[in-house]
């Protein structure tokens, strides 16, 4: 998934990164890598924090992801901070770049995930990558079916069960260095 996400960032970065005079050409790939890392980390952190409903809502929503969405806003904020710290961009340039790139990439990700003719992304694949496969075997796009998901033992399958399963998987993936380690190897960190 990370290679595909990076490609999606590249596709959306032409105007905001490559043609941006505030970004030296030799830093284009590093900024694209940082955007990829920030998006993946933001989604994984949201899942690990139990914000499964918000992540699922991003992919099931009918409006384009923008800064009004708290999840998108958080990812943008982290990217702005990273651009300022790692690439010495001023706050205006970092805010402009993040405000354009992050919603654009997330919008493309959501559209590709929803498109039945595009198999490059699936909700199952994205969540599985971010949780170390804790949702393996479940059709999250068609969930909440009764597949024995009663993880809290209360006799029913609900969002709380799904949240616990996904959140625990994301936490385990974070603590094992799974996504971070993989991202580091992709970006040579």
Image (spheres, rainbow, N blue to C red):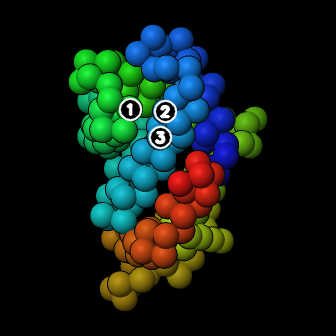
Q: Is residue 62 visible?
A: no
Q: Is residue 74 above or below residue 93?
A: below
- Secondary structure beneath dot 1 equals helix
| Res 31 label | 2
Instruction: Determine the CA span between mark 2 and mark 1.
Output: 8 Å
Q: Look at the numbered disc 3 and give the secondary structure of its residue.
A: helix
Residue at image coords 30%, 38%: 85
Q: Are marks 3 and 1 in contact (CB under 8 Å)?
A: yes
Percent of width and height locating residue 68: 26, 30
Residue at 37 percent of width and 27 percent of height: 98
Q: Label 3 to label 1, Cα distance in Å?
A: 10 Å
Q: Position of residue 45 (x, y in %)?
A: 36, 58
Which residue corresponds to mark 1? 87
- Label 2 to label 3, Cα distance in Å? 5 Å
Q: Is residue 50 left or right of residue 61?
A: left
Q: Are marks 2 and 1 in contact (CB under 8 Å)?
A: yes
Tag 3 residue: 34
> Going from the N terminus, do you reach mark 3 or mark 1 first?
3
């Amino acid at each position: 998934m990370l290679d595909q996400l990076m490609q999606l960032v590249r596709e959306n970065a032409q105007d905001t990164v490559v043609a941006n005079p505030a970004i030296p050409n030799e830093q284009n790939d590093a900024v694209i890598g940082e955007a990829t890392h920030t998006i993946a980390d933001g989604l994984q952190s949201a899942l690990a924090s139990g914000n499964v409903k918000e992540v699922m809502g991003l992919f099931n929503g009918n409006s384009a992801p923008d800064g009004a969405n708290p999840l998108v806003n958080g990812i943008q904020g982290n990217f702005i901070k990273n651009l300022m710290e790692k690439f010495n961009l001023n706050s205006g340039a970092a805010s402009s770049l993040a405000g354009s790139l992050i919603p654009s990439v997330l919008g493309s990700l959501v559209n590709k995930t929803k498109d039945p003719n595009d198999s490059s992304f699936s909700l199952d694949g994205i969540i599985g990558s971010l949780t170390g496969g804790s949702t393996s075997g479940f059709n999250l796009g068609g969930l909440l079916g009764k597949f024995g998901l009663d993880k809290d033992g209360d006799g029913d399958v609900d969002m709380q069960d799904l949240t616990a399963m996904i959140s625990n998987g994301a936490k385990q993936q974070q603590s094992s260095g799974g996504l971070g380690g993989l991202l580091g190897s992709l970006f040579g960190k």
